[in-house]
Amino acid sequence: MNQAWVSYLPAFLRKRVEGRHELQKVLTNTGWLFGDRLLRMGIGLFIGIWIARYLGPSGYGLISYAASMCAVFSAIAVMGLDAIVVRELVKEPEREQEILGTVLGIRVVASFAAYFLTVVTTFILRPDDRSSQLLVAVMGWAMIFGSFDVIDLYFQSKVQSKFAVYAKNTGFIIASIVRVALIAAKAPVVAFAAANSLEYCLGAIGLWYLYRRNGEFISRWRVRLELARKLLADSWPLVLSGIVFMVYMRIDQIMLGQMSTNHELGIYASAVKIAEIWFFIPTAIVSSVFPNIVRARQTDEKEFYNRLQKLYNLLAFLGYVIAIPVTFLAGVVVYLFYGEAYAAAAPMLVLLIWSDVFANLAVARNAFLMAMNWTRVLLVMTFLGAISNIALNFFLVPKYGGVGAAAASLISYWVAGHGACYLYKPLRRTANMLSRSLLYPRFW
């Protein structure tokens, strides 16, 4: 049976999807994910801007530093299991209860370890900064509540992301109302860190509730040590890769915070916020098509690579659609969003928005590596990106501040997502496919 929305499509698009039930299911799932991100982008951006204006560059820089510290160690809490769990649930649905229970057990232990490391590291890097230490200690609880995102992975494997959208958006909306109340009450910066953890707590409760409403029960989950060892054997390169990935995603803000001022970091963080609005696009698309990519690899190699090329083409096209207009309108965008106090963020935004093109392709390329189970290759690619980012920040930040950090991000994103693929012979076909998508991007 066709999805109801198909009848509303233009004729040339309707012909492409009619009768293709798997494609309709993927598009419906992607639509839910897009709706989720658009809601968050709209409400989240508005409230985020309001918070940035309320706190000012220095206060916004302080909370951005804490968020970056938590983000770096969040890779330990996730344990690199997301794509592996979806893959295993697709391949072995009969072991669903064991897989979910084992992964939850792993993540609960890992999230507490990640929280401890985040707090300790902050005390080492900023031993006299009590504000940063308190913010990290409060915000870090989001990692622990995030353990229950394993239920989200269950819904992803069923291509039923709408349930995760319901749950997480409920938590997001309630937390957003709390944030508005905090601004009205002129609350201190730590209160906004607490609101962030509250959002993840409510999201976890919502996921549990909807999982149960679907006739499933967490009480049926079982932890299997043998399965845990197997999953960890597959995921340890992804754990390292995730840590390295978050380093090269967030090290710019941490190094800028250490080598410059909270004020400069606040300016830079405002540009990052605008550039990262669009990150939901590749994530939503890839998470929806990944189960079908895994199936195609098992049945038809030619179709497998054909689907990958289409994915690369699409994400490159969408990257250009965003980067080109923002390049010319960066100053206007920053002024309208954040006001005169953040005007210096415009050149940073121009550099960061072009890094999104390579970030898009990296997300798609990572889906290929996961389908091939080349987790160690992914680790090496990400490591090269992180090393280049750290080195470039070390030389550019002291002289150019936030602009130097943005330039470092652009170059390192290209290295990790595209350039490094040419260094490894089995990936040169993929590198050429990525180059083709950059030179000839297509929407369809």
Image: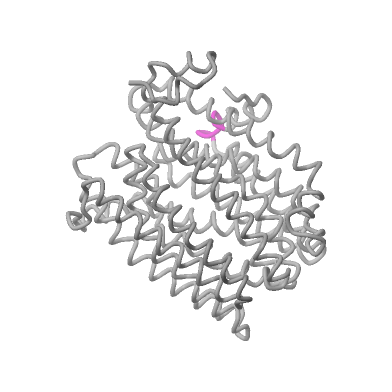
Q: Which residue occupies the foreground of this view, 339 or 367?
A: 339
Q: How are the colours assigned in the image?
A: one colour
Quarter holding the N terminus is: top left
Question: Residue 168's x, y, as percent?
Answer: 43, 53
Question: Residue 172's x, y, as percent?
Answer: 48, 57
Query: Residue at coordinates 63% horizontally, 41% vertically from top-left?
Result: 358
Seen in the picture, residue 59 relative to 392 is either above or below; the reply is below
Seen in the picture, residue 373 relative to 302 is either above or below; the reply is below
Number of numbered discs overlaid on the protein picture: 0
Q: Which quarter of the picture shows residue 435?
A: top right
Question: Residue 125's x, y, as percent?
Answer: 60, 77
Q: Which residues are magenta?
A: 425-430
Seen in the picture, residue 256 relative to 153 is either above or below; the reply is below
Q: Which residue occupies the foreground of this view, 357 or 298?
A: 357
Q: Which residue occupies the foreground of this view, 30 or 137?
A: 30
The chief SS type of the magenta part is helix
Question: Residue 266's x, y, as percent?
Answer: 71, 66
Quarter holding the C terminus is: top right
Seen in the picture, residue 411 relative to 62 is either above or below; the reply is above
Q: Which residue occupies the foreground of this view, 106 or 213?
A: 213
User: In this rendering, would 51 be left or right of 237?
Assistant: right
In this view, which residue lies farthest toward the bottom? 128
Instruction: Confirm whether the magenta stretch covers residue 164.
Output: no
